[in-house]
Image: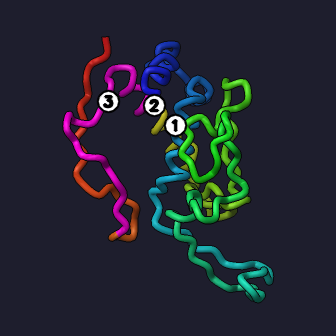
Amino acid sequence: LQDEIAKEASKVDLTNVSVDEMMKAFPLLRSFGYETQRIYSALPFLMFTAQDEIPFLDSMAPPGTEFISLQRYTGYNPKAPAASVKLGPTGEKADEFCSRRWLSEDGKGVDVPDTKGGGFLSFGHGMRSCPGRSLAEAEAVYFLASLLTKFKISLEPGHPKVGRSYASATDTVDRDVRLVLAPRE
């Protein structure tokens, strides 16, 4: 995957490109980013307020009811996958990580995840969605593309498998992660 993204990056002069051109030039990197955010959200939770009466469990929640959505279970819940998460290109289901899930059918664009179905809320939804989403996405694409054009990234040799820690309010890794950045040739 890193080599494919580096190949995407080799076609772009990152020192002289508009944000729109850059975002269009990296469909695989953007798809990977969306899938990573869906599975490993940086947000601990989102709060929602019902505007109208809505069904909730076996009853109706009145307008003004406040809900807290734990993000670690919103985009990725193997026991109840979100129906709004599309299948991957070779049939990968919502409970599987698939770096190509958000690529358009021709692979040249990105189908931006729908926030309405609840399967992707990394930037929130509606009037309280993140106003800096476009800037955050552009910064992440620029940073990762710049990094991957110059380096191959791997775990330090002998590094134990990295897992998730649920001991805090945020999703974090369960240990120090030691990376090796090897210059690309």
Residue 49 in percent (x, y) is at 66, 78
| Residue at the image point whose x is 57% and y is 76% from the top | 68
Does any portion of residue 14 appear in the rendered image? no
The magenta stretch is 142-166
Residue 95 in percent (x, y) is at 58, 53
Count of all numbered marks drawn on residues in the image: 3
Residue 39 in percent (x, y) is at 51, 52
Does any portion of residue 24 appear in the rendered image? yes
Callout 3, which amino acid? Ile
Task: Using the rendered view, name the quadrant where residue 26 is placed.
Answer: top right
* Mark 1 or mark 3, earlier in chain: 1
| Quarter of the image where the C terminus is located | top left
Residue hosting label 2: 142
Q: Is residue 23 shown above or below 50?
A: above
Q: Residue furthest top?
A: 185
Residue hosting label 1: 138
**What label does residue 153 carry, if any?**
3
Residue 112 in percent (x, y) is at 67, 42
Q: Residues within 10 Å of mark 1 (few under 14, many from 20)?
A: some
Left or right of residue 83, residue 47 in this image: left
Callout 2, which amino acid? Tyr
